[in-house]
Image: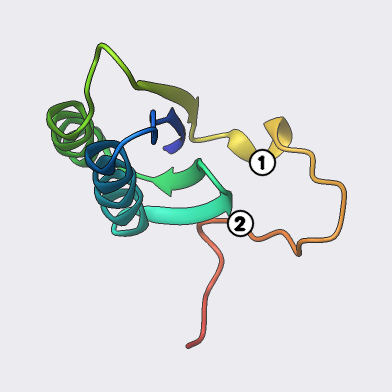
Amino acid sequence: MLVLITYDVNTEDASGRKRLRKIAKECVNYGQRVQNSVFECSLDAAQLRILKAKLLTLMDSDKDSLRFYNLGSSYKEKIEHYGAKQTYMPDDVIIL
């Protein structure tokens, strides 16, 4: 299933900037950054539970916010992309 993860981390102090880096790094491990604080992650249910638990321990719930949008398996009909950045589909083959 495709899960869209967005976050807003308060970076007014050094601890906030550290949380931001850690949350972004964890999201990169599971998906593709599509905007500064937005990731598309192709996950199964177990991976989603693990990632959600990790991110919730990293965030400060008094200062930060996380959002998880479960787009499911038939997400291709739900995504429209316009603009400069080339789009990709998480299940496409990526050659490095």
Mark 2 is surrounded, within 10 Å at the Cα level, by few (under 14), some (14 to 19) or many (20 or more) other residues, namely: some
Task: Report x, y in % for residue 32.
Answer: 48, 57
- Circle count: 2
Task: Give the residue furthest to the front.
Answer: 13
Q: Amino acid at mark 2?
A: Met
Rendering quarter of residue 19: top left
Real-space Cα distance between discs 2 and 1? 8 Å
Mark 1 is surrounded, within 10 Å at the Cα level, by few (under 14), some (14 to 19) or many (20 or more) other residues, namely: few
Q: Residue at x 56, y 48 (%)?
A: 36
Q: Amino acid at mark 1?
A: Lys
Residue corresponding to mark 1: 76
Q: Residue at x 26, y 43 (%)?
A: 14
Task: Report x, y in % for residue 85.
Answer: 76, 61
**Disc on the earlier residue, 2 or 1:** 1
Disc 2 to disc 1: CB gap under 8 Å: yes
Q: Quick check: 54 left or right of 9?
A: left
Task: Report x, y in % for residue 17.
Answer: 32, 45
Residue 48: image tag: none
Residue 89: image tag: 2
Rendering quarter of residue 81: top right
